[in-house]
């Protein structure tokens, strides 16, 4: 069994109005050292072992459902989970 952490963020070329609102709010709270905020998504998947390589399956999941590859980038980390 694998634990997969998936991180999805808007591409740098895509405007992030939600990030701009958060940055402005931080500035209004006197956190002026924050120069930029980008909002993203974080997901954890538990994936069972099978004949297919887990990297291949997760990449396909990201490209078909978890990320909008037109405007978003993704990356993932895979670690083997210890059965309990």
Image (cartoon, rainbow, N blue to C red):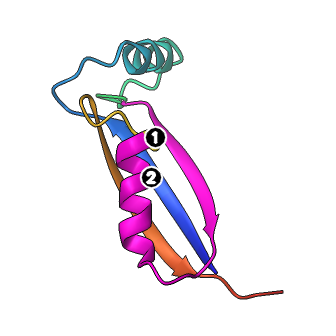
x 30%, y 28%: residue? 36
Quadrant for residue 12, please give it: top left
Residue on which the image places disc 2: 61
User: Which label belongs to residue 35?
Assistant: none
CB under 8 Å between discs 1 and 2: yes
Element at label 1: helix
Task: Locate the C terminus by quadrant.
Answer: bottom right
Q: Is residue 3 above or below residue 18?
A: below
- Neighbor class of circle 2 (other Cα within 10 Å; few <14, some 14-19, many 20+) is few
- Neighbor class of circle 1 (other Cα within 10 Å; few <14, some 14-19, many 20+) is few
Q: Which residues are magenta?
A: 38-64
Residue on which the image places disc 1: 65
Task: Locate the N terminus by quadrant.
Answer: bottom right
x 38%, y 24%: residue? 32
- Confirm whether the magenta stretch covers residue 70: no
Residue occupying the far front of the picture: 51
Residue 38 percent location from the top left of the image? 36, 31
Quadrant for residue 54, please give it: bottom left
x 22%, y 22%: residue? 14
Residue 68 percent location from the top left of the image? 35, 33
Residue occupying the far right of the picture: 84
Work out whether residue 22 or residue 1 is closer to the camera in this orientation and state it.
Answer: 1
Q: Is residue 37 above or below residue 48?
A: above
């Amino acid at each position: 069994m694998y634990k997969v952490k998936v991180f999805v963020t808007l591409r740098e070329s895509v405007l992030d109005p939600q990030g701009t609102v958060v940055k402005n709010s931080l500035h209004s709270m006197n956190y002026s050292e924050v120069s930029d905020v980008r909002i993203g998504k974080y997901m954890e998947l538990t994936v069972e072992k099978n004949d297919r390589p887990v990297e291949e399956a997760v990449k396909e999941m990201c490209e078909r459902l978890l990320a909008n590859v037109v405007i978003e980038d993704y990356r993932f980390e895979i670690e083997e989970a210890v059965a309990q």
